[in-house]
Structure formats: C-alpha cells, structure tokens
Amino acid sequence: MSVKPMRLLLVIDSLGSGGAQNQLALLAGKFVDCGHEVSLFYYFSQDFFLDRLRQFGVRIHYVPKQDKVGFSVIKALAKLYNQEKYDAVLSFLNTPNFYAGLAGRLSSHRPYTVISYRSKTNFNQMNWFTLLNQRWANSWADQIVANSHHERERWQETYSDQAAKWSTIYNAVDQQRFRPLPTKKEFPERFICVGAVRPLKNAALLVEAMHILKKNGEKIPMVDWYGDQGEKNVRLNNEYDRLNEKLSKTGLTEYFRWFSPTPRINEILPNYTALIHPSLLEGLPNVVCEALSCGVPVMLSNILDHPQLIREGKNGWLFDPKSAEQLVTAIRNYRSISNSDYLSMREQALASAKNLFAPRKIVQQYAEVLNVERRTADLNDQ
C-alpha cells in the first residue's frame, strides 16, 4: 500500500530520555525516510534526543510552557497549525494529547489528529478533572493509539462510545542500532536494568531478591542500573536515596552500580546476559523491546501485555512484581540453563523482536492510521 506524503507534526512534552520520547524520535526519523515532511513540537527544555532529531532532518519547534494550565502552549500550537497547514498531528502522552486536540479546536486549520497513550491509565486513582481532560482529548481526536492491547481494551470497555477510534500499535525498535554481538559465544553473568529511578520501576524488589540470595549463601548478582537518578527531581532523588540506604543496610552496595541515561544504550545492552525489568506499571517498555532486539533474554514483571512478549524459558522469564521470591526463582532458572540453551534463548529473543517490533511494520501501521487520503474522505463525507 502506498501512502501519500504528509506534512506531519509530532507533539510531546519534552525531549528527555524517557521511553515515549525515545519512541517518537525513532518514528520521526522513519517518517522522514518514507518521504514525509516532519516537524516536532515540545514545551519543556529537556533535550536528550534533540541532536538525533536534527540529524534526521526534523524541523524543531520549542515553545516553553509559561503557565500552569498551558495556555501558552495551546496558543502556540494553534498558531502553528494555521501557519504550517499540517496534514496530520501525532501526539504522545496525556497532557500533550489534550493540548494537541484543543489547539485543533481553536485553529481555523484543523489537522487530522491522532493521540497516543503510552502507559496504563489508572482510572481508580485519577481525579475527575484529569479524567475529564482525557475524555475531552479522546473526543477531539480522530484516532487513538495505545502501545499495548491491555490499555486499548480497558478504554474500550470503560467508554464504549469511543471504542471504534482505538487501535494498538507496538513500539518500533531500530534494529540496525539495537542488534546482537555477532561473534560472542560465551556469556559471563551480567545483569542490566534501564529506567528512571522511581517507585513504579520497582528497584526495591530487585534489592530484596538480591538480599534473599545473599542470605541463602548463593551468588549475589552484579547489577548495573542506567537511568535518571533524580538530580533535578526531588521525588526521584528521594527514591534514589531510599534505595541506596537499603543497599547499604543489606550489604549490597558493591553489587549495584548506578549510571546516568546514555544515548549509547544500544552499544551497552548487547554486552549483558539478561535485562531485569521489575516494573509495577507500564505501557510497552522500550528497553524490553530493545533488549530482545539485541538477543538479550529478559526477566520481566508479569503484568499487562508482558506475557505476550515473553515466552517462559524461551526468550525470558516472567515473575510477579510484588514477589521477590519469584524474581529469585527467575534468576535461579537463568543460572540453571546450559550455555547452548542460553545461546538458543538469545536467538529466540531476536526472532521475537523481529516479528513484533520491526520499524517498517510499525511505521506502516502509523501511516495507515494517519493516512491523509482517509482524512480527505472523512472531510468530504461531513
């Protein structure tokens, strides 16, 4: 299927090192490769992916948020819609979704608008105003994308009047950047975790599992954690301090190393023997997709869409994210397999990634959702 070239605007809160930003930067480059004219709008001054986007040839619009509600952002977006006459807008994350939709309502030129949810929406803990904003954003959108089947199904069941707008598109992985080490045949145990140091990433469970192994006289794993430790965020910094205190009390400090986020994670991941990802809440974690693309098996929390990514004992292991004992079992299962079985797991990890996260497949799905010809047909029917 050929897709008409688009003038496309991507909208997100920042260009920080988070998973949604990573995914949107990758998609931006792939859309450019497909011949589309791509711009990106953001409003918080975090620029982790800025250089990469410029290398792709993406036009950047940065407008700082100057008020709590975001009137300055909405006004700037509406002005941009009118000036640039975009064919379509794709936004990621809840607040950017709201801004992108409202700007379309306030501008004389309304682009075809697709919004995307990147994590599980917790309806029970959401206040009425936040839920109302998301309902408004959904009503203004032409299409809604979730990056997990679980999230899509929950919204469709809760608000059936908008069910037809929803679709699921998994994360893409640049499999030229994230790929296995071709010549390595033996793999001394090395575990890696990737993610911002915050409570939902559940590093405390991993520390508890390491402590259980220590008390049982078993080998204590070495763990390297890459992610934002909260230097500029008090809430994250408090979690980092709590974890270091726990490591100190259990005598595990020397086994746990902290590293800042790095754009070279694609070079780092293949050197590890397993990714441990004990998260309590996710959409579809980029790092899991990237690890599998590097042929690295994953020990993964058994939540949401995760069982669709991991086949037990084939490309990884699942565990209850509230049970340190189950994580200990996963580590023991990893240690019990032979080198030849481990090599087979790496091959199966890579095969599953090629099937699920191939960029051409994912970009094609987004292109179909954003299709300008569909938008034109819809407008003609009104």
Image: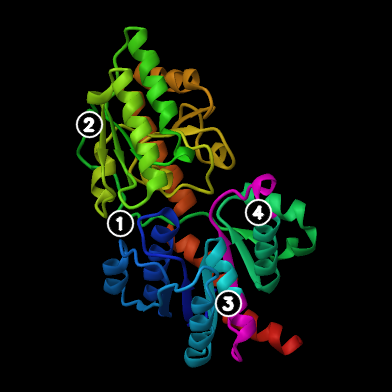
Describe the element under mark 2 as helix, strand or loop: loop
Q: Dot 2: few (<14), some (14–19), or many (≥20) neighbours within 10 Å? A: few
What residue type is disc 1 on? Gln
Between circles 2 and 3, the one closer to the viewer is 3
Q: Are marks 4 and 2 in contact (CB under 8 Å)?
A: no
Q: In screen coordinates, is 331 left or right of 8?
A: left
- Measured Cα–Cα span from mark 3 to mark 4: 20 Å
Residue where numbered disc 2 is placed: 185
- Measured Cα–Cα span from mark 1 to mark 2: 21 Å
What residue type is disc 3 on? Asn
Describe the element under mark 3 as helix, strand or loop: loop
Q: Which label belongs to residue 152?
A: 4
Point out residue 30 in the picture as x, y percentages from the top left corner. Answer: 39, 68
Residue where numbered disc 1 is placed: 176
* Direction right: furthest residue: 161
- Taking the spot 29% from the left edge, 49% from the top edge, the residue there is 261
What residue type is disc 2 on? Lys
Between circles 1 and 2, the one closer to the viewer is 1
Residue where numbered disc 3 is placed: 371
Disc nearer the start of the sequence (2/3): 2
Q: In screen coordinates, is 232 left or right of 138?
A: left
Q: Is residue 195 visible?
A: no
Between circles 3 and 4, the one closer to the viewer is 4
Report the span colored magenta: 102-127
Residue 81 inside the magenta-drawn segment = no
- Taking the spot 76% from the left edge, 51% from the top edge, the residue there is 157
Say above or below: 182 vs 72: above
